[in-house]
């Protein structure tokens, strides 16, 4: 039986800012060949188009209501049916938020790392057909050098400088995708004295029965309280 736990943890601890660093570094520059050999292959998942190796999200909220969201995604594309995963779109609102690509690489089966070029990142209006939504924009790019067996990884940061509602944050945190998922992590850092709305989250210690899944799975959701003077 495959079991995953989703935990909401409220802890009083001295926590370094999530905006300062990423907990999952790029595979580029590390022992890429060793990492590649440890990942599953098409033979392990014959019907899958890809494997979601990592889905990490971090939302840090500050006392003034501003927010910093960081996201890291890492896929292994198994065949041509998974090529659509190389097309990335990041939504944001003009004058209210800013997007920064932290890294984006395609790692070929032979270990060669091909970084995304800055000039290949396009900025466009998400709903150009609606005049009232011209401030809703997208950063869009397509990862380079895609081929079966490659790994796509990217990380970005969105700074929300003008929040609509103070301390309000909503996201969909998927437990299961259309293809195997190895690790899901969502972290939320709250201003001192704030707690998550537990009625809208799984209570602490909840266990999700994932017996129907045929792959290893790790899912963690954490909420922290900032106790330092940052923000």
Image (tube, rainbow, N blue to C red):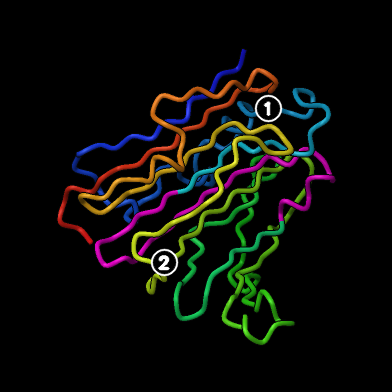
In the image, 131: left or right of 229? right
Q: Quadrant of residue 144?
A: bottom right
Residue 42 location (% of width, % of height): 78, 29
First in sequence, mark 2 or 1: give its number. Answer: 1
Give the camera-side residue of 196 and 56: 196
Vertically, is 108 above or below 88?
above
* Magenta span contains residue 141: no
In this view, the mark in front (2 or 1): 2
Judged from the image, the secondary structure of the residue bearing numbered disc 2 is strand
Residue 92 location (% of width, % of height): 54, 70
Category of crowding for the residue at label 2, using alpha-carbon neighbours closer than 10 angstroms: few (below 14), some (14–19), many (at least 20): some
Give the camera-side residue of 98 and 113: 98
Category of crowding for the residue at label 1, using alpha-carbon neighbours closer than 10 angstroms: few (below 14), some (14–19), many (at least 20): some
Outermost residue, front side: 199
Query: Mark 1 sits on what residue?
Result: 40
Residue 18 location (% of width, % of height): 33, 51
In the image, 105: left or right of 202? right
Q: Residue at x 77, y 38 (%)?
A: 78
Q: Residue at x 51, y 79 (%)?
A: 94
The mark tally for this picture is 2
In the image, 71: left or right of 204? right
Residues shaded magenta: 58-86
Outermost residue, top side: 1
Query: Mark 2 sits on what residue?
Result: 159
Outermost residue, left side: 229
Q: Residue at x 30, y 51 (%)?
A: 190
Residue 124 location (% of width, % of height): 65, 77
């Amino acid at each position: 039986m495959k079991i995953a736990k989703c935990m909401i943890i409220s802890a009083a601890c001295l926590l370094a800012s999530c905006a300062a660093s990423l907990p999952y570094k790029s595979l580029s520059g590390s022992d890429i060949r060793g990492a590649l050999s440890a990942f599953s292959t098409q033979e392990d998942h014959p019907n899958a188009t890809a494997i979601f190796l990592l889905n990490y999200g971090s939302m840090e909220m500050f006392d003034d209501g501003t927010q910093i969201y960081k996201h890291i995604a890492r896929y292994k594309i198994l065949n041509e049916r998974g090529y659509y995963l190389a097309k990335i779109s990041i939504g944001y609102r003009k004058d209210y938020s800013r997007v920064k690509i932290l890294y984006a690489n395609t790692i070929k089966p032979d270990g060669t790392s091909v970084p995304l070029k800055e000039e290949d990142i396009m900025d466009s209006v998400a709903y150009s057909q609606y005049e009232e939504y011209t401030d809703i924009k997208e950063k869009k790019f397509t990862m380079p050098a895609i081929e079966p067996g490659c790994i796509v990884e990217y990380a970005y940061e969105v700074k929300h400088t003008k929040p609509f509602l103070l301390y309000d944050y909503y996201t969909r945190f998927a437990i299961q995708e259309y293809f195997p998922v190895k690790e899901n992590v969502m972290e939320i850092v709250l201003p001192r004295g704030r707690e998550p709305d537990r009625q809208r989250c799984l209570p602490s210690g909840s266990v999700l029965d994932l017996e129907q899944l045929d792959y290893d799975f790790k899912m963690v959701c954490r909420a922290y309280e900032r106790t330092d003077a940052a923000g």
